[in-house]
Amino acid sequence: MKYDVGVIGLGAMGSSAAYNLAARGLRVLGLEAFTPAHQLGSSGGLSRIIRLAYFEHPAYVPLLRAAWDGWRDLETRTGAELLLQTGGLYAGRIGSHVLDGSLRSAEQHDLPHELLDADEVGRRFPALQLDADMQALHEPLAGLLYPERCIATHLELARQAGAELQFEEPVTGWTGDGRGGSLHLTTDRGEYDVDRLIVAAGAWLPQLVPELQLPLTIERNVLFWFEPVDAQPLRPDRLPVYIVELDADHAFYGFPLLADQGAKVARHHGGRPTTADKVEREATAADEKPVRDFMQRYLPAANGARRDARVCMYTNTPDQHFIVDTHPNDPRVVICSPCSGHGFKFSNVIGTIAADLAIDGGSSYDIAFLSLDRFAAATSL
């Protein structure tokens, strides 16, 4: 059977792309190497932050506004609870990436926000105990997404719209001459022909487009959940989602206490290099120690017994920005990810953009800063 569009990878971005394509009436084939909403890539972990005052770059803010509205619309249409609004708190010292970058995005895009000193943070959000020389930007339009639920919702909507989704069927390769005709996909179960293709394979992307020689590094990071010492200041109505940058090499993030989950705290970056197929899946005492040290000083109410731990892979680009672009040798192929550890919140809007690129070859969103040619330019210097 021939399909209009194939989607390789049905995680955050791929599930959204499959839904967006099928909803437009296209015959869609989705292929996933693992089970639906699995925990082996970059999208699992029960919660993911969504925030608009984006310290990574102000260019993301229009995409974030669309993503926020998109998640709310998806909730309205399906009845699923996907987004919990808690507000957000982004702390550091003057000159830090997290604080200064968040303030720059908030001011440039006129986002509601407040700049708080450490004393005010302690009064309003007593779970967090910042150093006296720290400040924090607080924004009301932030919160958390439930990633497994979000992916499952996109997959179900894709199925309802007619997409054929196949799981535990890894793609072993694809071919196309760049001049028309079909693209040919090979899996460990069979072969398929598609007119267009979206590759959204996360940490497995280098294996599927080796000809691009993408300058990607895969980083192992560990997420932790703890039983609280004091649950009251950790409740969602008293603690926003937060990111605290201690110095250029140490930033930590976390969530309020959620029912049946515990308090989730993790280090942002700082993990060791790995590969998608050889990553160590068990958390160690060495993984836990920096998180414990952070909680002991800055978040003591959460510093109880460890409840759970899961390994997440960041697939990093050199500039930490995403890849959302067509293949330079074949515009029928869309490359969608990697996201350098901060992409889940965008997955609904990136699915829309990927569908636009596959169908029309372009997007109404400004995604020039996410293009593939920025790597070629850097290589030629």
Image (cartoon, rainbow, N blue to C red):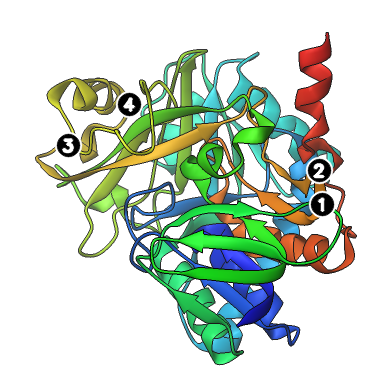
Please state which of residues 232 and 369 is positioned toward the viewer in this rendering: 369
Image quadrant holding the N terminus, namely bottom right
Q: Nearer the viewer, mark 1 or mark 3?
A: 1
**Amino acid at the residue labelled 3:** Glu
**Amino acid at the residue labelled 1:** Gly
Residue 178 tag number: 1
Q: In the visual, does 116 lie left or right of 299? A: right
Q: Nearer the viewer, mark 3 or mark 2?
A: 2
Calculate the distance from the C-alpha at mark 3 to the C-alpha at mark 2: 39 Å
Q: Residues within 10 Å of mark 2 (few under 14, many from 20)?
A: few
Quickly name the residue at label 4.
298
Please state which of residues 78 and 353 is positioned toward the viewer in this rendering: 353
Quickly name the residue at label 3.
282
**Residue 47: percent from the left, percent from the top?**
39, 55
Of mark 4 and mark 1, the one earlier in the sequence is: 1
Residue 329 tag number: 2
**Amino acid at the residue labelled 2:** Asn
| Relative to 213, residue 31 above or below | below
Give the structural element (helix, strand or loop) at label 1.
loop
Calculate the distance from the C-alpha at mark 2 to the C-alpha at mark 1: 6 Å
Calculate the distance from the C-alpha at mark 4 to the C-alpha at mark 2: 50 Å
Calculate the distance from the C-alpha at mark 1 to the C-alpha at mark 3: 42 Å
Q: Nearer the viewer, mark 4 or mark 1?
A: 1
Using the rendered view, name the quadrant where residue 128 is placed.
top left
Give the structural element (helix, strand or loop) at label 4.
helix
Q: In the visual, does 314 lie left or right of 266? A: right
- Please report the residue visible at 46 percent of the width from the left and 40 percent of the height from the top: 242
Q: Is the Cβ of the residue at disc 2 closer than 8 Å to that at disc 1?
A: yes
| Relative to 333, residue 343 above or below | above
**Amino acid at the residue labelled 4:** Tyr
